[in-house]
Image (cartoon, grey):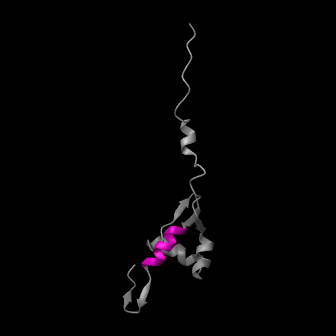
Amino acid sequence: MLLTTPARSTPHPLSVMAPGPHIPPRQVLSEADQASRWGMSPKILQRWRMQGRGPHYLKLSKRVNYPLNAVIAFENCVQHVSTSQRATV
């Protein structure tokens, strides 16, 4: 009698890790793009990172990127209605 192994019902472990077509690519801005967006020097963003200020960022090796959703969230947090009060979001 010949025994056969059943067909694999679960995907290969590495195929689970790979993003599928339903996952949109993450939108990020480089440090230069972010500085240009706000009309400031990249040095200001570097100083803010050292001080723990500014939007959340990704650092992969020496490369710094700002996720677009983190930038927009930060912009919403620092909005002001007048010089005496912040905008409520």
Image quadrant holding the N terminus, namely top right
- Examine the rendered structure and indicate whether residue 4 appears above or below residue 67: above
Q: Is residue 34 left or right of residue 79?
A: right
Q: Residue at x 50, y 73 (%)?
A: 72
Q: Is residue 64 magenta?
A: no
Q: Residue at x 44, y 83 (%)?
A: 79
Residue 24 on image: x %, y %: 58, 58
Q: Residue at x 51, y 75 (%)?
A: 47
Residue 59 on image: x %, y %: 54, 61
* Residue furthest to the bottom: 83
Image quadrant holding the C terminus, namely bottom left
Residue 83: name its quadrant. Answer: bottom left
* Residue furthest to the top: 1
- Examine the rendered structure and indicate whether residue 69 appears above or below residue 11: below
- Examine the rendered structure and indicate whether residue 69 appears above or below residue 80: above
Task: Magenta stretch: give its range.
Answer: 68-77
Q: Main secondary structure of the magenta part?
A: helix
Instruction: Depth check: give the residue in front, 21 or 60.
Output: 21
Instruction: Depth check: give the residue in front, 39 or 17.
Output: 17
Residue 86 on image: x %, y %: 39, 85
Residue 43 on image: x %, y %: 57, 77
Instruction: Depth check: give the residue in front, 29 or 87.
Output: 87
Q: Residue at x 52, y 34 (%)?
A: 10
Task: State how many labels appear.
Answer: 0
